[in-house]
Amino acid sequence: MSIIVPANTLAAGGFSVDNSCRFNIGSSDHLTRSLGGSPTSTRKATWSYWVKRSTLTSSASEMIYSNEVADDNNRGFIQFEDNDSFRMTDSVSSTQLKTNRLFRDVASFYHIVLAIDTTQGTAANRIKLYVNGVQETSFATASYPDQNDDLKILTGGQTNKQHISKVHGGSGYFGGYLSEFVFIDGLQLAPTSFGEFDEDSGIWVPIDVSGLTFGTNGFYLDFEDSSALGNDANGGTDFTVNNLTALDQSLDTCSNNFNTYSPLWGMQAIRVPTFEEGNLKITGDGDAQHHQVMGTFAVNKGKWYWEAKFTVSADIGKNKVGIMSVDLGSPQTAEIVDQSGSCVFVNEDGGDFRRDNATVDQNSGVFTQNQIIGVALNMDDGEISIYRDNSLIVDALDIGDADGTYVTPASVHYRDAGMEFNFGSAPYALTSSAADGDGFGAFEFAPPSGYFALCSKNLAEYG
Protein backbone atom coordinates (compact mmCIF):
# COMPACT_ATOMS: atom_id res chain seq x y z
CA MET A 1 0.00 0.00 0.00
CA SER A 2 1.35 3.41 -0.96
CA ILE A 3 1.80 5.77 1.97
CA ILE A 4 3.91 8.91 2.32
CA VAL A 5 6.11 9.74 5.27
CA PRO A 6 8.48 12.73 5.57
CA ALA A 7 11.37 11.06 3.72
CA ASN A 8 9.28 11.26 0.54
CA THR A 9 8.77 15.00 0.69
CA LEU A 10 10.46 18.21 -0.42
CA ALA A 11 10.28 21.53 1.39
CA ALA A 12 9.39 24.81 -0.29
CA GLY A 13 11.80 26.20 -2.84
CA GLY A 14 12.58 26.13 -6.56
CA PHE A 15 10.06 26.26 -9.42
CA SER A 16 6.52 25.67 -8.21
CA VAL A 17 3.58 24.23 -10.14
CA ASP A 18 0.40 25.76 -8.74
CA ASN A 19 -2.38 23.66 -10.24
CA SER A 20 -3.41 20.33 -11.65
CA CYS A 21 -6.65 19.09 -13.21
CA ARG A 22 -8.65 16.39 -11.41
CA PHE A 23 -10.28 13.86 -13.76
CA ASN A 24 -13.13 11.57 -12.72
CA ILE A 25 -13.98 8.38 -14.63
CA GLY A 26 -17.62 8.30 -13.50
CA SER A 27 -18.41 11.66 -15.08
CA SER A 28 -16.40 10.97 -18.27
CA ASP A 29 -14.12 13.98 -17.79
CA HIS A 30 -11.95 14.73 -20.83
CA LEU A 31 -10.40 17.39 -23.06
CA THR A 32 -10.58 17.49 -26.86
CA ARG A 33 -9.39 19.83 -29.61
CA SER A 34 -9.40 19.79 -33.39
CA LEU A 35 -6.04 20.31 -35.07
CA GLY A 36 -5.70 23.38 -37.27
CA GLY A 37 -3.05 22.27 -39.72
CA SER A 38 -0.23 19.97 -40.70
CA PRO A 39 2.15 19.09 -37.87
CA THR A 40 5.71 20.31 -37.60
CA SER A 41 6.71 16.66 -37.87
CA THR A 42 5.10 13.24 -38.12
CA ARG A 43 8.41 11.66 -37.07
CA LYS A 44 9.56 13.64 -34.02
CA ALA A 45 7.68 14.61 -30.86
CA THR A 46 7.81 14.57 -27.05
CA TRP A 47 5.10 14.28 -24.41
CA SER A 48 5.74 15.31 -20.81
CA TYR A 49 3.20 15.17 -18.01
CA TRP A 50 2.95 14.64 -14.25
CA VAL A 51 0.27 12.19 -13.17
CA LYS A 52 -1.13 10.96 -9.87
CA ARG A 53 -3.47 8.04 -10.35
CA SER A 54 -6.66 7.59 -8.34
CA THR A 55 -8.39 4.61 -9.89
CA LEU A 56 -6.76 1.24 -10.42
CA THR A 57 -8.99 -1.12 -12.34
CA SER A 58 -8.57 -4.60 -13.78
CA SER A 59 -11.48 -4.15 -16.17
CA ALA A 60 -10.45 -1.22 -18.37
CA SER A 61 -7.50 0.78 -19.62
CA GLU A 62 -7.20 4.48 -18.81
CA MET A 63 -6.31 6.78 -21.66
CA ILE A 64 -3.91 9.67 -21.09
CA TYR A 65 -3.61 10.86 -24.70
CA SER A 66 -4.95 9.77 -28.07
CA ASN A 67 -4.77 11.14 -31.59
CA GLU A 68 -7.88 10.65 -33.71
CA VAL A 69 -7.31 10.30 -37.44
CA ALA A 70 -10.64 10.93 -39.12
CA ASP A 71 -10.05 9.22 -42.46
CA ASP A 72 -9.31 5.74 -41.12
CA ASN A 73 -9.22 3.63 -37.97
CA ASN A 74 -5.47 3.94 -37.53
CA ARG A 75 -4.55 5.94 -34.45
CA GLY A 76 -2.03 6.27 -31.65
CA PHE A 77 -2.53 6.04 -27.89
CA ILE A 78 -0.73 6.68 -24.59
CA GLN A 79 -2.42 4.89 -21.70
CA PHE A 80 -2.30 2.85 -18.52
CA GLU A 81 -3.29 -0.73 -19.25
CA ASP A 82 -5.84 -2.69 -17.19
CA ASN A 83 -2.91 -4.35 -15.40
CA ASP A 84 -1.49 -0.86 -14.57
CA SER A 85 1.43 -1.02 -16.99
CA PHE A 86 2.21 1.89 -19.34
CA ARG A 87 1.57 1.37 -23.04
CA MET A 88 2.14 3.47 -26.15
CA THR A 89 0.75 2.15 -29.43
CA ASP A 90 0.62 3.31 -33.02
CA SER A 91 -0.92 1.43 -35.93
CA VAL A 92 2.05 2.25 -38.18
CA SER A 93 4.41 -0.76 -38.30
CA SER A 94 2.43 -2.22 -35.35
CA THR A 95 4.37 0.06 -33.01
CA GLN A 96 3.95 -0.79 -29.34
CA LEU A 97 5.90 -0.12 -26.17
CA LYS A 98 4.56 -1.76 -23.00
CA THR A 99 6.37 -1.71 -19.66
CA ASN A 100 7.01 -4.46 -17.19
CA ARG A 101 6.79 -1.78 -14.51
CA LEU A 102 3.32 -1.36 -12.98
CA PHE A 103 2.14 2.11 -12.03
CA ARG A 104 0.14 1.53 -8.85
CA ASP A 105 1.22 4.40 -6.61
CA VAL A 106 -1.85 6.50 -5.76
CA ALA A 107 0.00 8.62 -3.19
CA SER A 108 2.51 10.41 -5.43
CA PHE A 109 3.01 11.99 -8.84
CA TYR A 110 4.90 10.22 -11.59
CA HIS A 111 6.67 12.25 -14.26
CA ILE A 112 6.32 10.60 -17.67
CA VAL A 113 8.31 11.64 -20.75
CA LEU A 114 7.74 9.87 -24.06
CA ALA A 115 10.17 11.01 -26.74
CA ILE A 116 9.91 9.94 -30.42
CA ASP A 117 12.27 10.27 -33.39
CA THR A 118 11.72 7.69 -36.12
CA THR A 119 14.70 9.04 -38.11
CA GLN A 120 17.09 7.40 -35.64
CA GLY A 121 19.18 4.54 -37.04
CA THR A 122 18.94 2.46 -33.87
CA ALA A 123 15.42 1.11 -33.37
CA ALA A 124 15.42 1.49 -29.57
CA ASN A 125 16.24 5.19 -29.93
CA ARG A 126 13.11 5.86 -31.98
CA ILE A 127 10.90 5.74 -28.87
CA LYS A 128 12.30 6.53 -25.44
CA LEU A 129 10.35 6.42 -22.19
CA TYR A 130 11.48 8.14 -19.00
CA VAL A 131 9.91 7.86 -15.54
CA ASN A 132 10.94 10.45 -12.94
CA GLY A 133 13.99 11.40 -14.99
CA VAL A 134 15.29 7.86 -15.55
CA GLN A 135 15.02 6.01 -18.85
CA GLU A 136 12.84 2.91 -18.76
CA THR A 137 14.56 -0.13 -20.29
CA SER A 138 12.44 -3.11 -19.16
CA PHE A 139 9.54 -3.80 -21.50
CA ALA A 140 7.03 -6.61 -21.80
CA THR A 141 6.59 -5.58 -25.45
CA ALA A 142 8.95 -3.44 -27.51
CA SER A 143 7.99 -3.16 -31.17
CA TYR A 144 9.59 -0.04 -32.64
CA PRO A 145 8.55 1.79 -35.80
CA ASP A 146 10.59 1.41 -38.95
CA GLN A 147 13.12 4.13 -39.68
CA ASN A 148 11.50 7.32 -41.00
CA ASP A 149 7.95 6.07 -40.36
CA ASP A 150 5.28 8.79 -40.25
CA LEU A 151 3.26 7.96 -37.13
CA LYS A 152 -0.50 8.25 -36.80
CA ILE A 153 -0.15 9.60 -33.26
CA LEU A 154 1.57 12.63 -34.83
CA THR A 155 -0.77 13.09 -37.80
CA GLY A 156 -2.36 16.54 -38.05
CA GLY A 157 -4.89 18.27 -40.27
CA GLN A 158 -8.23 19.96 -39.65
CA THR A 159 -10.21 16.69 -39.58
CA ASN A 160 -8.03 15.17 -36.86
CA LYS A 161 -8.32 15.59 -33.07
CA GLN A 162 -6.24 15.33 -29.92
CA HIS A 163 -7.89 13.83 -26.84
CA ILE A 164 -6.84 13.77 -23.20
CA SER A 165 -8.55 11.21 -20.95
CA LYS A 166 -10.48 9.44 -23.69
CA VAL A 167 -10.21 7.54 -26.94
CA HIS A 168 -12.20 8.18 -30.11
CA GLY A 169 -15.72 6.88 -29.59
CA GLY A 170 -15.87 7.87 -25.92
CA SER A 171 -14.25 5.34 -23.62
CA GLY A 172 -11.07 4.75 -21.64
CA TYR A 173 -11.53 7.73 -19.33
CA PHE A 174 -8.79 8.56 -16.83
CA GLY A 175 -9.19 8.94 -13.07
CA GLY A 176 -6.65 11.06 -11.23
CA TYR A 177 -4.60 14.24 -11.45
CA LEU A 178 -2.68 15.63 -14.43
CA SER A 179 -0.24 18.51 -14.06
CA GLU A 180 2.12 20.37 -16.43
CA PHE A 181 0.94 18.52 -19.55
CA VAL A 182 3.22 19.33 -22.49
CA PHE A 183 3.30 18.14 -26.10
CA ILE A 184 6.29 19.14 -28.24
CA ASP A 185 5.62 18.80 -31.97
CA GLY A 186 8.87 18.39 -33.93
CA LEU A 187 11.56 17.58 -31.35
CA GLN A 188 12.70 14.51 -29.40
CA LEU A 189 13.69 15.98 -26.02
CA ALA A 190 15.34 14.57 -22.91
CA PRO A 191 13.57 14.69 -19.52
CA THR A 192 15.97 17.44 -18.44
CA SER A 193 13.90 19.81 -20.61
CA PHE A 194 11.06 19.34 -18.12
CA GLY A 195 12.58 18.43 -14.76
CA GLU A 196 15.71 18.08 -12.67
CA PHE A 197 16.99 16.26 -9.60
CA ASP A 198 16.87 18.48 -6.52
CA GLU A 199 20.46 18.92 -5.36
CA ASP A 200 19.65 18.48 -1.67
CA SER A 201 17.09 15.67 -1.66
CA GLY A 202 17.70 13.93 -4.97
CA ILE A 203 13.95 14.08 -5.71
CA TRP A 204 12.97 14.64 -9.36
CA VAL A 205 11.15 18.00 -9.55
CA PRO A 206 9.60 20.14 -12.31
CA ILE A 207 11.27 23.11 -13.98
CA ASP A 208 9.84 26.00 -15.99
CA VAL A 209 8.86 24.77 -19.48
CA SER A 210 7.40 28.01 -20.84
CA GLY A 211 10.50 28.76 -22.93
CA LEU A 212 10.37 25.54 -24.96
CA THR A 213 9.58 25.42 -28.69
CA PHE A 214 6.22 23.65 -28.93
CA GLY A 215 5.73 23.38 -32.71
CA THR A 216 2.59 23.67 -34.81
CA ASN A 217 0.40 21.18 -32.95
CA GLY A 218 2.20 21.34 -29.61
CA PHE A 219 0.55 22.57 -26.42
CA TYR A 220 1.16 23.42 -22.79
CA LEU A 221 -1.64 22.81 -20.27
CA ASP A 222 -0.84 24.44 -16.92
CA PHE A 223 -4.47 24.33 -15.65
CA GLU A 224 -4.05 27.75 -14.03
CA ASP A 225 -7.34 29.21 -15.37
CA SER A 226 -10.20 27.47 -13.55
CA SER A 227 -12.71 28.94 -16.01
CA ALA A 228 -10.79 27.46 -18.98
CA LEU A 229 -9.00 24.29 -17.90
CA GLY A 230 -8.30 23.49 -21.56
CA ASN A 231 -6.37 26.71 -22.09
CA ASP A 232 -3.17 26.26 -24.09
CA ALA A 233 -0.68 28.41 -22.21
CA ASN A 234 1.54 28.32 -25.29
CA GLY A 235 -1.09 30.35 -27.18
CA GLY A 236 -2.35 27.61 -29.48
CA THR A 237 -5.90 26.36 -29.94
CA ASP A 238 -7.53 25.64 -26.59
CA PHE A 239 -8.98 22.27 -25.73
CA THR A 240 -12.74 21.96 -25.31
CA VAL A 241 -13.63 21.05 -21.73
CA ASN A 242 -16.02 18.13 -21.33
CA ASN A 243 -17.69 17.56 -17.93
CA LEU A 244 -14.89 19.35 -16.09
CA THR A 245 -15.72 22.42 -14.01
CA ALA A 246 -13.81 25.01 -12.01
CA LEU A 247 -14.03 22.61 -9.05
CA ASP A 248 -11.72 20.25 -10.93
CA GLN A 249 -8.85 22.70 -10.74
CA SER A 250 -6.74 21.33 -7.91
CA LEU A 251 -3.91 22.57 -5.68
CA ASP A 252 -2.63 18.99 -5.53
CA THR A 253 0.41 19.08 -7.83
CA CYS A 254 3.82 17.65 -8.57
CA SER A 255 5.28 20.56 -6.54
CA ASN A 256 3.01 20.17 -3.51
CA ASN A 257 1.36 16.80 -3.16
CA PHE A 258 -1.71 16.55 -0.87
CA ASN A 259 -3.12 13.65 1.12
CA THR A 260 -6.06 11.76 -0.39
CA TYR A 261 -7.70 8.45 0.51
CA SER A 262 -6.22 5.20 -0.74
CA PRO A 263 -8.12 2.44 -2.56
CA LEU A 264 -5.20 0.07 -1.94
CA TRP A 265 -5.73 -0.75 1.73
CA GLY A 266 -6.39 -4.48 2.14
CA MET A 267 -9.85 -4.12 3.72
CA GLN A 268 -11.22 -2.88 0.41
CA ALA A 269 -10.88 -6.38 -1.05
CA ILE A 270 -13.94 -7.35 0.98
CA ARG A 271 -16.04 -4.18 1.23
CA VAL A 272 -15.38 -1.80 -1.61
CA PRO A 273 -16.72 1.74 -1.34
CA THR A 274 -16.89 4.05 -4.33
CA PHE A 275 -13.85 6.31 -4.79
CA GLU A 276 -14.47 9.44 -6.86
CA GLU A 277 -13.08 12.93 -7.45
CA GLY A 278 -9.43 12.08 -7.02
CA ASN A 279 -10.18 9.80 -4.04
CA LEU A 280 -11.71 12.67 -2.07
CA LYS A 281 -15.35 11.54 -2.36
CA ILE A 282 -16.10 8.21 -0.69
CA THR A 283 -19.49 6.46 -0.69
CA GLY A 284 -20.50 3.07 0.70
CA ASP A 285 -21.51 0.40 -1.82
CA GLY A 286 -24.99 -0.17 -0.37
CA ASP A 287 -24.19 -3.26 1.70
CA ALA A 288 -25.26 -3.20 5.34
CA GLN A 289 -21.62 -3.21 6.34
CA HIS A 290 -18.96 -0.72 7.36
CA HIS A 291 -16.56 0.41 4.64
CA GLN A 292 -13.27 1.77 5.93
CA VAL A 293 -10.73 3.95 4.16
CA MET A 294 -7.39 5.40 5.21
CA GLY A 295 -5.18 8.21 3.95
CA THR A 296 -2.06 8.24 1.81
CA PHE A 297 -0.07 10.31 4.35
CA ALA A 298 1.06 9.16 7.78
CA VAL A 299 2.41 11.45 10.53
CA ASN A 300 4.00 10.90 13.93
CA LYS A 301 4.55 14.55 14.88
CA GLY A 302 3.28 18.01 13.99
CA LYS A 303 -0.18 19.60 13.99
CA TRP A 304 -2.53 18.93 11.09
CA TYR A 305 -5.97 20.05 9.93
CA TRP A 306 -8.50 18.77 7.40
CA GLU A 307 -12.25 18.98 6.76
CA ALA A 308 -15.05 16.59 5.84
CA LYS A 309 -18.49 17.29 4.38
CA PHE A 310 -21.50 14.96 4.62
CA THR A 311 -22.97 14.79 1.13
CA VAL A 312 -25.15 11.67 1.01
CA SER A 313 -28.21 11.78 3.23
CA ALA A 314 -28.89 8.02 3.30
CA ASP A 315 -27.40 6.47 6.44
CA ILE A 316 -25.63 9.74 7.17
CA GLY A 317 -25.62 8.93 10.86
CA LYS A 318 -23.39 5.95 10.19
CA ASN A 319 -20.44 8.01 8.95
CA LYS A 320 -17.35 8.16 11.14
CA VAL A 321 -14.41 10.54 10.80
CA GLY A 322 -11.09 10.37 12.58
CA ILE A 323 -7.69 8.72 12.53
CA MET A 324 -6.18 5.27 12.67
CA SER A 325 -2.75 3.84 13.25
CA VAL A 326 -0.91 2.53 10.22
CA ASP A 327 0.30 -0.30 12.48
CA LEU A 328 -3.18 -1.74 12.08
CA GLY A 329 -2.08 -3.20 8.77
CA SER A 330 -4.63 -4.94 6.57
CA PRO A 331 -7.27 -6.79 8.61
CA GLN A 332 -9.53 -8.99 6.53
CA THR A 333 -12.27 -9.99 8.98
CA ALA A 334 -12.65 -7.28 11.61
CA GLU A 335 -13.90 -3.71 11.63
CA ILE A 336 -11.22 -1.14 12.26
CA VAL A 337 -13.55 0.43 14.82
CA ASP A 338 -13.14 -2.72 16.87
CA GLN A 339 -9.36 -2.80 16.83
CA SER A 340 -7.80 -2.18 20.22
CA GLY A 341 -5.36 0.71 20.44
CA SER A 342 -5.69 1.59 16.76
CA CYS A 343 -8.22 4.28 15.98
CA VAL A 344 -10.25 7.26 17.14
CA PHE A 345 -13.50 8.30 15.46
CA VAL A 346 -16.28 10.79 15.91
CA ASN A 347 -19.59 8.96 15.47
CA GLU A 348 -22.26 11.08 13.78
CA ASP A 349 -25.24 9.20 15.30
CA GLY A 350 -25.18 11.41 18.35
CA GLY A 351 -21.94 13.32 18.17
CA ASP A 352 -20.23 10.77 20.41
CA PHE A 353 -16.49 10.43 20.18
CA ARG A 354 -15.21 6.89 20.33
CA ARG A 355 -11.76 5.44 20.86
CA ASP A 356 -11.18 1.77 20.09
CA ASN A 357 -14.93 1.18 19.89
CA ALA A 358 -15.69 2.69 23.33
CA THR A 359 -17.42 6.03 23.95
CA VAL A 360 -15.00 8.47 25.57
CA ASP A 361 -16.75 11.80 25.02
CA GLN A 362 -20.44 12.67 24.52
CA ASN A 363 -21.83 15.76 22.80
CA SER A 364 -25.39 16.80 22.11
CA GLY A 365 -26.76 17.03 18.58
CA VAL A 366 -26.28 14.99 15.47
CA PHE A 367 -24.46 15.86 12.28
CA THR A 368 -26.52 16.81 9.23
CA GLN A 369 -25.99 16.92 5.52
CA ASN A 370 -23.57 19.58 4.20
CA GLN A 371 -22.13 20.37 7.61
CA ILE A 372 -18.35 20.79 7.66
CA ILE A 373 -16.43 18.76 10.21
CA GLY A 374 -12.96 20.09 10.98
CA VAL A 375 -10.32 17.71 12.35
CA ALA A 376 -7.35 19.20 14.22
CA LEU A 377 -4.77 16.52 14.98
CA ASN A 378 -1.99 17.40 17.44
CA MET A 379 0.58 14.64 17.25
CA ASP A 380 3.07 16.57 19.39
CA ASP A 381 0.78 16.33 22.44
CA GLY A 382 -1.24 13.24 21.48
CA GLU A 383 -4.59 15.08 21.18
CA ILE A 384 -7.36 15.55 18.66
CA SER A 385 -10.05 18.25 18.44
CA ILE A 386 -13.21 18.27 16.34
CA TYR A 387 -15.12 21.26 14.97
CA ARG A 388 -18.65 21.34 13.58
CA ASP A 389 -19.16 24.29 11.21
CA ASN A 390 -16.24 25.97 12.97
CA SER A 391 -17.65 25.41 16.48
CA LEU A 392 -15.43 23.36 18.77
CA ILE A 393 -17.28 20.25 19.97
CA VAL A 394 -14.41 17.99 21.09
CA ASP A 395 -11.53 19.81 22.74
CA ALA A 396 -8.07 18.25 22.93
CA LEU A 397 -9.20 14.67 23.45
CA ASP A 398 -6.36 12.34 24.45
CA ILE A 399 -5.75 9.89 21.61
CA GLY A 400 -3.60 7.61 23.69
CA ASP A 401 0.09 6.89 23.41
CA ALA A 402 1.02 8.54 20.12
CA ASP A 403 4.75 8.69 20.75
CA GLY A 404 6.50 7.22 17.73
CA THR A 405 3.24 5.92 16.24
CA TYR A 406 2.31 6.89 12.70
CA VAL A 407 -1.35 7.70 12.23
CA THR A 408 -3.33 8.60 9.11
CA PRO A 409 -6.72 10.21 8.41
CA ALA A 410 -9.47 7.61 8.25
CA SER A 411 -13.23 7.30 7.85
CA VAL A 412 -15.97 4.69 7.98
CA HIS A 413 -19.03 4.57 5.70
CA TYR A 414 -22.05 2.38 6.37
CA ARG A 415 -24.33 1.19 3.57
CA ASP A 416 -24.82 4.29 1.33
CA ALA A 417 -23.22 6.80 3.68
CA GLY A 418 -20.96 9.21 1.85
CA MET A 419 -18.59 12.07 2.52
CA GLU A 420 -16.29 14.44 0.68
CA PHE A 421 -12.91 15.37 2.14
CA ASN A 422 -10.80 18.47 1.94
CA PHE A 423 -7.13 18.12 2.81
CA GLY A 424 -6.48 21.50 1.22
CA SER A 425 -7.96 21.09 -2.26
CA ALA A 426 -11.70 20.49 -1.89
CA PRO A 427 -13.77 18.57 -4.48
CA TYR A 428 -16.78 20.71 -3.49
CA ALA A 429 -17.52 24.44 -3.65
CA LEU A 430 -16.28 26.58 -0.76
CA THR A 431 -18.19 29.63 0.42
CA SER A 432 -14.91 31.05 1.71
CA SER A 433 -11.28 30.12 1.21
CA ALA A 434 -8.84 29.99 4.12
CA ALA A 435 -5.24 28.80 3.81
CA ASP A 436 -3.08 27.53 6.64
CA GLY A 437 -0.44 29.71 8.28
CA ASP A 438 2.07 28.96 5.52
CA GLY A 439 -0.39 29.82 2.78
CA PHE A 440 -1.08 26.25 1.68
CA GLY A 441 -4.50 24.75 1.02
CA ALA A 442 -7.99 26.21 0.72
CA PHE A 443 -10.44 25.38 3.53
CA GLU A 444 -13.96 26.45 4.39
CA PHE A 445 -12.75 27.57 7.82
CA ALA A 446 -9.35 28.81 8.88
CA PRO A 447 -7.24 26.07 10.48
CA PRO A 448 -6.45 26.68 14.17
CA SER A 449 -3.25 28.62 14.74
CA GLY A 450 -0.22 26.39 14.30
CA TYR A 451 -2.10 23.65 12.39
CA PHE A 452 -1.26 22.90 8.77
CA ALA A 453 -2.63 21.20 5.66
CA LEU A 454 -1.48 17.63 4.99
CA CYS A 455 0.68 18.38 1.98
CA SER A 456 4.23 17.43 1.07
CA LYS A 457 5.74 20.89 1.64
CA ASN A 458 4.26 21.06 5.13
CA LEU A 459 5.23 17.47 5.82
CA ALA A 460 8.84 18.22 4.95
CA GLU A 461 8.75 21.25 7.28
CA TYR A 462 6.77 19.96 10.26
CA GLY A 463 6.25 16.21 9.80
Image (cartoon, helix red, strand yellow):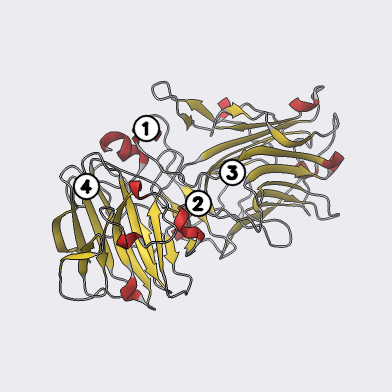
Q: Residue at horizontal 82%, vertical 34%? A: 145
Check contact, mark 2 vs mark 1: CB within 8 A.
no
SS of the residue under disc 1:
helix
- What residue is pinned by disc 3? 235
Residue 262 located left or right of residue 212: left
Please tell me how crowded label 4 is: few (under 14), some (14-19), or many (20+) other residues with Cα within 10 Å: many
Estimate how packed mark 2 is, as few (under 14), some (14 to 19) or many (20 or more) residues with alpha carbons within 10 Å: many
The disc at residue 295 is none
Kindly identify which residue carries mark 4: 451
For marks 4 and 1, give the one nearer the viewer: 1
Residue labelled with disc 2: 21
Q: Rounded to the nearest whole Å, what is the CA distance between mark 2 and mark 1?
A: 26 Å
Task: Looking at the image, tell me whether mark 4 or mark 1 is earlier in sequence order.
Answer: 1
The residue wearing badge 1 is 7
Q: How crowded is mark 3: few (under 14 residues within 10 Å), some or many (20 or more)?
A: few
> Closer to the observer: label 2 or label 1?
1
First along the sequence among labels 4 and 3 = 3
Q: Which of marks 2 and 3 is in front?
A: 2
Q: For numbered disc 3, what is the local secondary structure?
A: loop
Circle 2/circle 4 CB separation < 8 Å = no
In this view, the residue farthest toward the bottom is 314
Q: How far apart are marks 2 and 3 (CA)?
A: 19 Å
